[in-house]
Image (cartoon, rainbow, N blue to C red):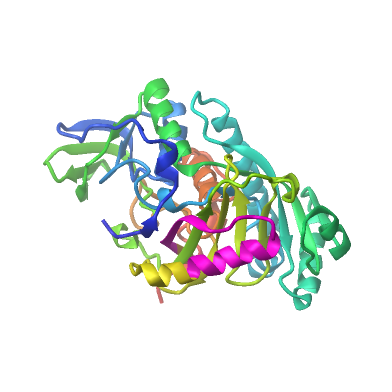
Amino acid sequence: MKNLHEGRLYWQETLPHSKTYPSLQQSVQADVAVVGGGMSGAICSYVLAQNGLRTVLLEREKVAGGSSLANTGLLQFCNDVMLTDLIAQIGERQAVLFYKACETAVKELERVACKFSVDTEFKRRSSLYYASSEQDVPKLKEEYANLHANGFDVEYWEPERIGSHFPFRKPGAVVTHGDAQVNPYRFVHAVVDAAAAKFGLGVYEDTDITGHETDEQGLHALRTATGAIVSARHVVYAVGYEPEELRGQLIRSEMNRTSVIVTEPQPDLTPWHGHYLIWETARPYFYTRLANDGRVIAGGYDEPNGHPLAGRGAREKLANKLAERVKELFPSFSVQPEYEWNATFAVSRDNLPFIGEDPKWPRVYYCLGYGGNGTVYSMMGSLLLRDLINGRDNPISPIVGLGRRSLQNA
């Protein structure tokens, strides 16, 4: 398995005794086989199994053991690509449709999280998206105007209002309402466990797929390292940030790395108005949130390199920079990192996820939530693939589908 992160991770310590599943030893049949046990695979499996499809989830190692461990759990309908820029890229109608789909996905994540007996630490939050410099203010005001005109619940805050709510001032900010946060590790396990218990999802860990063949009738056969065969009408690849796993696909993505810190719990959270999610207009951007136990989670300083930093010294330099950024915003906080890691993430060439049927391989689908909004994209993709597999149209299919023009090979 590709090494997706380096450092001391936090989330698995919040669920030390997670449920485990056996490896696949005997051949099975299913309507849908989902390959990948991270956030995308878990949510896809849940949605498809809930919809009455016989579904199996196949994970090469452990459920939630890959990039989900490095996920920082921010759930926002706004994206790395501003609505303003997306309008210029794909047109206003489709850009707004995509943003509305993200908004719906956050609501659906809340609906699902509310069904679990396990606390996934899902909390509704607002976000403060601030201008990193005076030069960013005109663009930020344009972004606010576009969001407001299209019915999103947003406000524009001038520096005085920011300073009256927080111990810092910024040139301006857009406040979005309707976002959320979650513990990604707990959420993935809760989703998989619930789908197995309630909807008959077959879950197999330590199950490596070594071959994929399709017969003349279009039935897919996935061969495992132990020789077992999974026969399925449909196959969904939800393989996270491992693009070499894509078989027969035309996608190219850029692999980057990011840094994250988690502090000790803060004794006084009063300075943090509304426990807002906070991020900025600069690229690469800094972002931060609070965990349910009062720890500060902060990330950023993304770099165009897909290999996480293995050297502790190099990671500590970035961790200290993140801690300094938190201290600038909240001078009263203790910002010494108790956890720090460096992790791989992927971005597409057009800043949109890869979700849909392979144009060259019938009934083979991909749910790849590349970018900084992966959990939201995972839910969006699950709802889209549910519709495609059931033969229903979905309006965002041409926006995120794998046949869109920007993804074609030259």
Q: Quadrant of the C terminus?
A: bottom left
> What percent of the width, then of the height, locates residue 10?
44, 48
Q: Quadrant of residue 81?
A: bottom right
Of 65 and 145, the residue lying toward us: 65
Of 391 and 308, the residue lying toward us: 308
Residue at horizontal 79%, vertical 72%? 137
Of 84 and 240, the residue lying toward us: 240
Question: Is residue 348 at all visible to an observer of this figure?
Answer: no
28 horizontally vs 15: left or right: left
Q: Quadrant of residue 358?
A: bottom left
Numbered marks: total: 0
> What percent of the width, then of the height, locates residue 378?
49, 46
Q: Residue furthest left?
A: 227
Q: Magenta stretch containing residue 191, yes or no?
A: no
Q: Is residue 262 above or below residue 227?
A: below
Magenta range is 318-345
Of 29 and 186, the residue lying toward us: 186
